[in-house]
Amino acid sequence: MDPISLWLPIVWATLIGAAVALYVCLDGFDLGIGILFPLEPSEIRRDTMMNSVAPFWDGNETWLILGGGGLFVAFPLAYSVIMPGLYLPIIIMLLGLVFRGVAFEFRWAAKPHHELWDIAFAGGSIVAAFMQGVVLGGYLEGIDVQNNAFAGGPLDWFGPFPFFTGVAMVIGYALLGSTWLIMRTEGPLADQARGWAKWLLLGVLVCMLVISLWTPLAFDRIAERWFTWPNILYLSPVPLLAFIFAFLCWHGLRSGREAMPFLSAICLFLLGFLGLAISNLPYLVPPSLTIWEAAAVPESQIFTLVGVLIMLPIILGYTAFVYWTFRGKVREGEGYH
Amino acid sequence: MEIDAVLLARIQFAFTVSFHIIFPSFTIGLSAFIATLLVRWRMTGEERFHRLARFWTKIFAVSFAMGVVSGVVMSYEFGTNWSHFSVVVGNVVGPLIGYEVLTAFFLEATFLGIMLFGWSRVPPTLHVASAVLVAIGTSLSAFWILAANSWMQTPAGHEIRDGIAYPVDWIAVIFNPSFPYRFAHMFTAAYLTTSLVVLAVGARYLVTGRFKEEAHTMLRMGLGMVAILTPLQMYIGDASGLNTAKHQPEKVAAIEAHWDGNKPGELVLFAIPDEAEERNLFSIAIPNLSSLLITHSWDGLFPGLKQYPAEDRPPVIPVFFAFRIMVGMGVLMLLIGWIGAWYWMRGRLFETRWYLKIAQYAWPLGFIAILSGWYVTEIGRQPWVAYGILRTADAASPVAASAVLTTLVLFFIVYLCVFAMGIYYINRLIEHGPKGAGAKTPEALPSRPLSAAHEAAHEAMEGN
C-alpha cells in the first residue's frame, strides 16, 4: 500500500473519532441536563438548568453532523453500511433530538403553558441518549455485511447488550449534566446536582465495569486485543487512568470542588471512548470492514482534509470564544434568554 | 416488497426535505435582515431598528431551531435511506456536504449563541458582528447545498469507473453547469420569501393600527426588496430555465407538457397531461410561444417527451402543475411589489387600506413558490437521482419496507406536531409585537430577552 492510501484513512479515522468524542462530551452534558429535568420540579430552577446550556447546544450538536458527515465524506462504504444497519435506533435518536432541540425555543415561547415542552425536552433527551447507546451497542455487536452492503434485518440490533449500553449512556450523560450544573450554577440547584452526581458516578463505574467484562466475553477479537501479551501491558494504563479519574471525580464531589467533577467526568468518558476504539481498531464496521477497506478515494479524502485542517482550528477557536463569553455562574432568574 | 421500500423511502425523503427547506428559506433571508437592522441601528442610533432586530431575532430563533433539527435528520438520511447513493456518488457529493458543515454549519450554530443570548454579554459591535456571521453562515450553507444538488442535476468534473463516480476536477464539480443559475435562483428566492413575510407583518400591524413606527419601517424595507427582487428573480428563473433546456431537456419538456419535438412548442396555460395517451387534455395554449421563450425563435424546435423512452421520462403532471403554481406566485409577488411601490411613490402606501389588507396575507407566497419550484426541479430530474449516473430506484438502502413505514409514520406525527406548534408560537410572537413580547408572562420576565437587567444596561448605554 502506498503511503497516502495507508495514512489518509488513519488520519480521517482519528479526525472522526475526535469529532465523535467531542460530540459525546459536549452534547453529553446538555443532553444530561434534559435527562435530569424530571428530578427538579421547580420551574425557576429548570429555567436555570436550561439557560446554562442554551447558548451552546446548537454548536454542540454540530459535532454529531461532523461525525456523520465525516463518515459520509471519508468512508462512504462504512456510512452506507452502518446507517441502514442501525436504521431504527438512528432515526428514533434523531426524532428525540428534534423534540428536545425545538424545546429550547418552544418552551420559552409557550410560557406559562410550557409543561408539554418540559416533557418533550426531558423525553427527547432521554430517548436520544438511550438510542445513542443502542447504536453504540449494536455497532459493537457487529453489522451483517455481504458484498459491501448491509444484509441484515431491521431488528438485528435488538438485544440485551445494546439495551444495556443504552441505559449506560443515559446514566453517563446524566453524570456529565449534573457535574456541569455543579460547575455552572450555585445554591440549592448546585447542591442538589452534587447529590445526584455521586449516585450517577457510581452508576457509571458499574456500567463501565460491566461493559469491560461483557465485551471481551462476548467478542473474541476484543478479548484477544486486551488479554494477550504484551498488549495487556501496553493497554494497562487505560483502566488505571480510569480509576484515577473516577477517584478524582469522587474526591471533587466530596470536597466541594466546582470544576474538578466535570473535568474528571469528561476524562472518564474520553477513556471509555478510547477503550472502545482500542477494542475495535482497525475495524470501522466491526467485524467486517477495516478503515482502509471502507475509505473513499484519496482525491476525496484530501480535498476535504484541506478544508478540515484550515477550518477546524478556526471552529475550535470560536467555539472556545463562545464558551468564554458565557463563562461564570448562571444565576436563578438571570438567564440570557 | 422491494419496490414498496423504495417508494416509502422516497415519500419519507420528500416529506422531510419539504419540511426542512421551509426554514432555511426563511432564515437565510431573515438573518440578513436582522444583521441589516442591527447595522442600521449602530449607524443611525435609531431605536426602532433595535426594537425590530430584537423582535425578529425571537422569530428567527424559533425558525432556526426547527431548521437545525430537521437539517440534522437530512444529513443522516443519505445513509439510512439512500446508502447506495452514498456509495455511488459519495466520493463527489460527500466532500461538498463536508464543506457545508465545516464552513457554514459550525459558524451559524456557534455564533447563534451570541446572537440570541449575547445582547448584554458582549459589546454591541461584537453582537452585530455575530449576527453578520450567522447571516454569512446561512448563505454559505446554501452555497454548498446548491453545489451538491446542482451536481446531481448536471454532473461535471467526475469520471465513472465500475459504476462509481470519482472526482477529477473539484472546481468543475462545484461550479457545474447549472450551479450558478440554481444558486442565484434559490438565494434570491430566500430573500424574497423573507421580504414578503416582513412586508405582510408590517401590513398586519398597520391594518390593526399597532406598532406604527416599526410597521412603516418593515413595510418600506420589505416592499422595496419585493419590488426589486421579483423582476430580478423572474429574469434569473428564465436564465435557469434556458440552462435546464440545454442540460436536462426532458425536464423542460415535462414543464411545458411538450410531447412532439417535431412541432414548435405551444405555451400551455392549462391542461391535464395524459401520460398514457401522450397528449394534453383540455388544453388552453398559445401557439409557438414556448418555442419563442426556449429557443428564441418563433418556429424553433426543442425536444418533446415522446423522444424519450417512457422509463426515462419524469412524471409529467406534478412537474407541469408545480411549475405553473411557482410562476403564479411570482406574478402575485410582482403585483404586490409594484402596486405597493406605486402607492409608495405617491406617498399613500400607509393609508391605502385595501392594499394593506391584502398584503398582510402575502406571507406564504414565497414558501409556496419555493416548495413548488423544488418539486419542479427534483421531480423533473426523475427517474434519476444523479442525472445520467444513478436511478432513484437503484439508490435506496437495503432496509425493510416495514422499518421505513414505521419511521415515515413517526416523522409524520413528530413533524406535524412540531410544525403546528412552531407556526402557532411564531404567530403569537408576531401578535405580541416588537415591544410587548415576553412581558405578558410575569414569571418568565426575568429570563426573556427584554430582561430587567438588560433594559437597565441598555438605558445606560443610550445615556452615553
Image (cartoon, coloured by chain):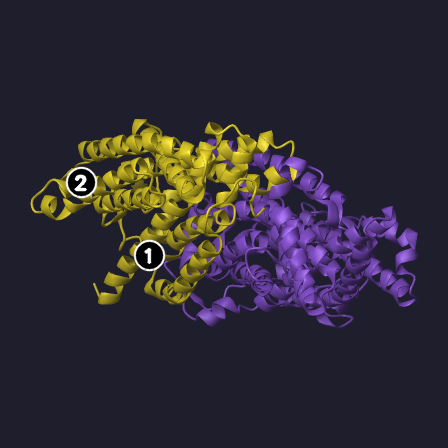
Tell me, yes or no, whether dots 1 and 2 are on the same chain: yes
In the rendered structure, the answer to whether residue A271 lies left or right of residue B397 reads: left
Q: Which mark is residue A169?
A: none
Q: Which mark is residue A221?
A: 2
**Which x, y percent locates residue B280?**
75, 50
In the rendered structure, the answer to whether residue A297 lies left or right of residue B443 reads: left
Kind of residue sitting beneath label 1:
Leu
Observer-side mark, 1 or 2, equals 1
Quadrant position of residue A298:
bottom left
Residue of label 1: A15
Q: Colour of chain B?
A: purple
* Mark 1: secondary structure: helix
Name the one closer to the observer, A70 or A300: A70
In the rendered structure, the answer to whether residue A138 lies left or right of residue B209 reads: left
Q: Residue at x 39, y 64 (%)?
A: A313
Q: Residue at x 44, y 32 (%)?
A: A36
- Of the image marks 1 and 2, the number of the one nearer the N terminus: 1
**Which x, y percent locates residue A53?**
48, 45
